[in-house]
Amino acid sequence: MIRPLPAHQRYPGIDPAYLRMPHVEKGMAVGLFGGSFNPPHAGHALVAEISLRQLHLDQLWWMVTPGNPLKDASELAPLAERLAQSERIAKDPRIKVTAFEAAYNVRYTADTLKLIKARNPGVRFVWIMGADSLAGFHRWQRWQQIAMTFPIAVVDRPGSTLAYLSSRLAKTFAHARVDEADAPLLSRFRAPAWTFIHGPRSSLSSTAIRNGRRRSSESKVDRGRS
């Protein structure tokens, strides 16, 4: 039987601490903010800050994934690079940048949440996502299982304020919606439970940043040929 390489060998140059699940204590409220962060930007930091404040979290795990099954990996920066960039942006000491999913070789959020729940009994977790992810949430692998595992906080993003009204999540789990005024208590609710959090919004997006870099690179090449 061929055994997979240990995570530190599959991802050389990464501090092994990033490949371990962050330490938590029973009774803590912890936000789970996952994504490819390719690249991370101030908009991500804003979502994290709003979540820490509005949800009264003790910690927030900034989970940098090895790759997103729904996205093209051809432009995906190395994991070590995305971790380093995330550390520079995530200033609050309550934010724990981690890539433990790489060590456990999980690809889908449903599997990640199942793993977290099994290994951290007594901890109150909340899954956090930007409202721009809400429209396509029903295309995620076992998305209803995700909603049944931990409460969900959807944080406002530009152009997505009304997304929760028409999303499959909102329609399927309309009975489980928690009023925004009760967001500080969300971690104490039993899943399914979700809320939409309004607040300051950043127009930055990883896709726009990558496209801007590509155009700049192509422009430099064109100037070099002229």
Image (spheres, helix red, strand yellow):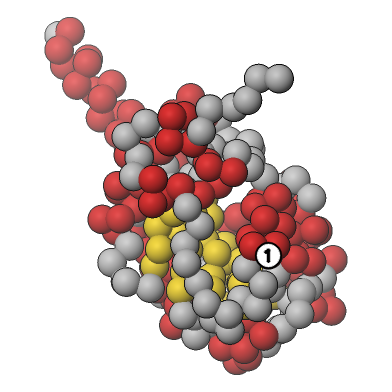
Q: Quadrant of residue 178?
A: bottom right
Residue 212's x, y, as percent? 32, 37
* Whether residue 30 is situated above or below residue 168 in the rendered picture: below
Provide the residue designation for mark 1: 117
Q: Residue furthest bottom?
A: 181
Quadrant location of the N terminus? Answer: top right
Residue 166's x, y, as percent? 75, 63
Q: Residue furthest top?
A: 225
The answer to whether residue 60 shows anywhere in this view is yes
Residue 177's x, y, as percent? 75, 79
| Residue at (30% x, 47% y) in the render | 84
Quadrant location of the C terminus? Answer: top left
Q: Quadrant of residue 118?
A: bottom right
The answer to whether residue 47 shows anywhere in this view is no
Report whether 139 appears left or right of 5. Answer: right
Closest to the observer, 156 or 27: 27
* Whether residue 212 is situated above or below residue 164 in the rendered picture: above
Closest to the observer, 125 or 178: 125
Residue 2's x, y, as percent? 65, 20
